Amino acid sequence: MQLVHDQMPLPLLMINTKFDTLQYTPEASKVFDVTECFLDMVDEGSKSKVEKWIQPKQGKSKLEINIYGKSSDVVLTEVYVRWMNDLHAEVILYPKEKQNEHITTMLDKLQNRLNDTNFALLEEKEKVEDTLKENYRLSAPFIQLTKDIAFVPLFGDVSEEKLHTIKEQVLAKAHDHHSNRILFDFTAVGELSAEGFRVLNEVFKTLDFMGKEIVLIGVKPKHSMKINEFKVQLNIQFLHSLQTAIYRYCSR
């Protein structure tokens, strides 16, 4: 069992057909009690579901099971499985309580800062940060066009900080709205930094693991060399314009 560092922003395991844990990411060990055998991490009531659905013949699969957390508590978890070949599979673990835990962690950090910082100055700083984050969120709204199709137009320069804010919003809404196809519009994108490109790759990789079809619209020539790298790794389609996308997917 090997600890590996992966760009995936969610807990990730690599297992074999015997459910041996071959590799795991730091994110997995922070949330779950990672064991040599993946089945030992699973609550007794969920083991039969794992044995049935996490098999090479099932291909990509999604299931909801109970897994033991770091404090031996049971964590309700959505599991996304992709078999790389007949022997090895990558397993993403998405705790249902993840968002609440994230909020709790942020509140704890805020309390510690308040103990060491002038309250008035901190309050003003938080207002500025909240405004900036809200502007970032508005620069990539998640718009539900149909039951199965969502639209995410990107505006302005694509930096690492902006994309970290956008990433949380897009992944959460993609999960909640159950959209099968997500259209990303690059028509109004300015500069795409190397760090922003890295975070964008994380977003697309996670969506691909969730079984979402990704369509990129209006990619500029100056971005195409970087963006085309996604096409090699993931199931991504490219369209010239939003008009073409609407005609193809929304006019039926």
Image: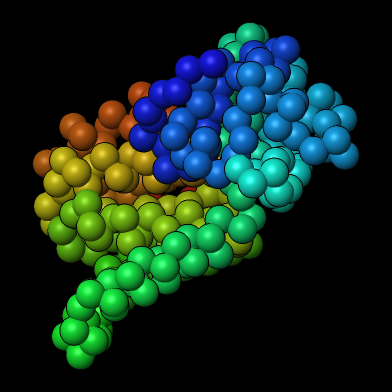
Residue 216 visible in the picture: yes
Q: Residue furthest front?
A: 115
Q: In the image shown, does 143 or 3 lie closer to the viewer?
A: 3
Coordinates of residue 129 in the picture (x, y in percent):
23, 75
Residue 241 visible in the picture: no
Coordinates of residue 194 in the picture (x, y in percent):
16, 41
Q: Residue at 61% of width from left, 50% of height from top?
A: 95
Question: Can you tell which quarter of the image residue 85 is in?
Answer: top right
Q: Is residue 148 left or right of residue 132?
A: right
Q: In the image shown, does 51 or 109 lie closer to the viewer?
A: 109
From this view, report whether residue 55 is shown above or below residue 147: above
Q: Residue at 28% of width from left, 72% of height from top?
A: 113
Question: Can you tell which quarter of the image residue 62 is in?
Answer: top right
Q: Residue at 36% of width from left, 24% of height from top?
A: 232
Q: Is residue 33 left or right of residue 156?
A: right
Q: Is residue 71 left or right of residue 242?
A: right
Q: Residue furthest bottom?
A: 120
Q: In the image shown, does 115 or 56 lie closer to the viewer?
A: 115
Q: Residue at 27% of width from left, 32% of height from top?
A: 228
From this view, report whether residue 48 is shown above or below residue 136: above
Coordinates of residue 225 in the picture (x, y in percent):
18, 32
Q: Residue furthest top?
A: 87
Coordinates of residue 65 in the picture (x, y in percent):
76, 42
From this view, report whether residue 97 is shown above or below residue 32: below
